[in-house]
Image (spheres, helix red, strand yellow):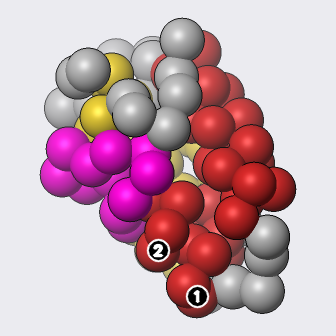
Amino acid sequence: MIDEFSVVVAADHQTSAEVDGESVILDLEEGVYYGLNPVGARIWKEIQEPTAVEEVTAAITAEYDVASEQCRRDVISLLQDLEENDLIKIEK
C-alpha cells in the first residue's frame, strides 16, 4: 500500500524518454511501452531517485495549481498504477 510516507523509486528494468513534455517508458522485461502526460512525466522525473510521496506531492503542488489533498490522491493513484505495472519499487 502506498501512502504519503512511502518512499518510491523507478524500477531498474525500464528505460524512459521525454517526448514533447510527456514521458514514454519501456518495460525492458515485458517489452511494453507506457505513456505519461506532462504531470505524470513530472512525477516520473521526481522518482528517478528514491523519494517520499510527500516530497513528490509538495513538488507538484508548488508547480501546478492544485489543492494539496487532491494532488496527494492523484499522485498516489498514479504511483499505484505504476506499481501494478511493476515500473516502480516501494522502498519503505
Find the magenta span and give its range.
44-55
Residue 79 percent across, percent down from the top left: 57, 36
Is residue 82 visible from the viewing direction of this image? no
> In the displayed structure, does residue 9 sit left or right of residue 76?
left
Q: Amino acid at mark 2?
A: Ala
> In the displayed structure, does residue 33 sit left or right of residue 44?
right
Q: Nearer the viewer, residue 27 or 53?
A: 53
Asked which secondary structure carries label 1, the reply is helix
Residue 77 percent across, percent down from the top left: 71, 35
Tell me if residue 47 comes above or below residue 20 in the rendering: above
Quadrant where the image shows the N terminus = top right
Query: Where is residue 69, by image quadrant?
Result: bottom right
Tell me if residue 16 comes above or below residue 88 in the rendering: below
> In the displayed structure, does residue 65 sit left or right of residue 76?
right
Q: Which residue is mark 2?
A: 59
Q: Nearer the viewer, residue 43 or 19?
A: 43
Residue 8 percent across, percent down from the top left: 33, 35
Quadrant where the image shows the C terminus = top left
Is residue 45 visible from the viewing direction of this image? yes
Q: Residue at x 19, y 32 (%)?
A: 12
> In the displayed structure, does residue 9 sit left or right of residue 56?
left
Q: CA distance from mark 1 to mark 2?
A: 6 Å
Q: Which residue is mark 1?
A: 63
Q: Is residue 46 magenta?
A: yes
Kindly check if marks 1 and 2 are in contact, taking CB atoms under 8 A apart as contact. Answer: yes
Q: Is residue 91 magenta?
A: no
Query: Where is residue 14, by image quadrant?
Result: top left
